[in-house]
Image (cartoon, grey):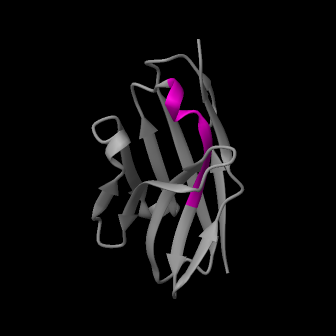
């Protein structure tokens, strides 16, 4: 089992920045990728960004150039730096890990972009 704990969400004005953190614990060896997804009420969960164990990153078109995913292997933590936030970025953000063909999820953290 892999446990994921997110932090860093909150309320920010348009154009502002937030950094989300996701700390992994448990059976973290052989995690092949970690990422961030987001979900608005009544909509499917969508990929925002991911980073593989080899360091390859991938981003949704809507966040390219604004969001950056990174990781600290020593802390077993993945970060999502979000800059130039827009009202349409307002969603619940979920951390995700893939290990041995299974997906694990954090509890979610709310990001609200509003003036």
Residue farthest along the right direction in this orientation: 107
Residue 15 placed where, x, y %?
43, 18
Residue lying at 27% horizontally and 64% vertically, measured from the top left:
56
Residue 8 in view: no
Quarter of the image holding residue 13?
A: top right
Residue 71 placed where, x, y %?
41, 56
Residue lying at 51% horizontally and 75% vertically, measured from the top left:
98
Q: Is residue 87 above or below residue 64?
A: above
Between 48 and 43, the one lying in front of the other is 43
Residue 103 placed where, x, y %?
58, 75
Residue lying at 66% horizontally and 60% vertically, measured from the top left:
106
Segment tinted magenta in the rendering: 87-95
Total numbered circles? 0
Between 72 and 44, the one lying in front of the other is 44
Q: Is residue 22 above or below residue 1?
A: above
Residue 20 placed where, x, y %?
54, 43
The answer to whether 2 appears left or right of 87 in the picture is right
Q: Quadrant of the N terminus?
A: bottom right
Q: Is residue 102 magenta?
A: no
Residue 9 in view: yes
Residue lying at 47% horizontally and 60% vertically, measured from the top left:
35
Residue farthest along the bottom direction in this orientation: 100
The answer to whether 108 appears left or right of 36 in the picture is right
């Amino acid at each position: 089992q892999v446990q994921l704990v997110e932090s860093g969400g909150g309320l920010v004005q348009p154009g502002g920045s937030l950094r989300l953190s996701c700390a992994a614990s448990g059976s973290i060896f052989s995690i092949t990728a970690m990422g961030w997804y987001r979900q608005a009420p009544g909509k499917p969960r969508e990929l925002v960004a991911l980073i593989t164990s080899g360091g390859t990153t991938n981003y949704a078109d809507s966040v390219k150039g604004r969001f950056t995913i990174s990781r600290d292997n020593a802390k077993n933590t993945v970060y999502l730096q979000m800059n130039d936030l827009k009202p349409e970025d307002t969603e619940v953000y979920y951390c995700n890990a893939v290990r041995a063909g299974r997906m694990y999820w954090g509890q979610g953290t709310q990001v609200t972009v509003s003036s």
